[in-house]
Image (cartoon, helix red, strand yellow):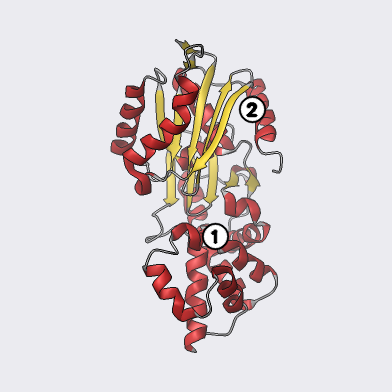
Amino acid sequence: MMDEQSVIGIDGGGSKTEFVWVRRDGQVLSTARKRGSNYQDVGIDGLNGLLEEVLSPWLTSANREGPACICLGLAGAGRPDEQRTITESLLEKGWADRVRVENDARIALAGAHGGKGGVIAIAGTGSIVFGMGQNGNWVRAGGWGPLLGDEAGAYDIAMRALRTVLAAHDGSGPETLLSRALLAELGLRGWTELVGRVYGGDLDRSALARLAPTILRCAEGGDRVAVDVVRSAADGLAGQIAAVTRRLGIDREDALSYTGGLLTCSPSLRVHIEEALRYRGVSMRLRAARLPPVLGAVLLAWERVGSPLDESELNKLEVVATELYPEA
């Protein structure tokens, strides 16, 4: 039996995966937070293992009805064949009669603007800019992954900083407070130890991405090299925001939102991005998303059911958001 008054939203990112099972009236039935589930990292087997871990205990109880729909927004799953594979796998489980699979940027945008058009800049471990115009057309920029892009994501900022530190070590770049700060953060006695730990796999992408807050603190403390690192990364993301707004013809000041752990915790990074936007002639300000991505997945689940939420129901989800994220 399926409960036509409840849906499950899932936000699968590079560092964590969030689950919420919520009724249409705003009652939260269950929540969970687990490890990351970027599809390019974990594949279908890893994803299935994670979903089994959370959803099987929720949905196999004999006295509980399943949700009307499960919507999963997943990093690294932006292509139709990947989404089809994931959808078929979930339907085979019998947890819900309807399944919707999107990339994580799509659910973030839905949450940011309450299902309406606009632009969302996302920067956590990686980054992407996603937008929807008034006619429903979609445009994206960035999100090419750690080797090809992810400007102003935590990993991108960390790698920019490490390259400048190594240049200072070699004498080919300026001295910076980052050298001492990052050595301490990494627990290294000297920079010659870095090679073995990076190429040996000890310091993987997630571990290096965790350096970003230290780099931002050095920039906020006035270290010029750290400031240049952050500005360079911010400029890359600003260029992608400008490209998306231009292609969609969006210029409303309130049409640009942000989400992702890095942008959320760093007002200074947002300031650098807005400065770079003004340099490009874009006057839009970065505004906090109306709803977090996991509740954006809830909105898209109700769309899949064929019963979109009205404004009063969106207001109830805002209350849910404050309960899920009291520190926001």
Q: Which residue is mark 1?
A: 210
Which percent across, then down, holds residue 8?
Answer: 50, 26
- Which residue is pictured at 52% across the width and 78% down the height? 165
Q: Position of residue 58 (x, y in %)?
A: 50, 23
Q: Is residue 55 in sight in this rendering?
A: yes
Q: Residue at x 45, y 36 (%)?
A: 73
User: What distance separates the C-alpha of mark 1 from that of mark 2?
Assistant: 31 Å
- Numbered mark located on residue 83 in the image: none
In the rendered image, which residue does mark 2 sit on? 317
Residue placed most toward the observer, 116 or 23: 23
Is 301 or 11 nearer to us in this picture? 11
Residue 292: x %, y % from top left: 59, 38
Q: Residues within 10 Å of mark 1 (few under 14, many from 20)?
A: some
In this rendering, is residue 182 above or below 245?
A: below
Classify residue 93 as left or right of residue 19.
left
Label 1: element kind: loop
Quadrant position of residue 115: top right
- The amino acid on which the numbered mark 1 sits, given as a three-letter code, is Arg
How many marks the image carries: the answer is 2
Q: Tag 2: residue type?
A: Leu
Disc nearest the viewer among 1 and 2: 1
Residue at 54% x, 58% y is 238
Q: Residues within 10 Å of mark 2 (few under 14, many from 20)?
A: many
Instruction: Answer with left or right where residue 7 lies relative to residue 200.
Output: right
Is any part of residue 236 visible from this angle?
A: no
Q: Earlier in the sequence, mark 1 or mark 2?
A: 1
Q: Is residue 54 above or below residue 211?
A: above
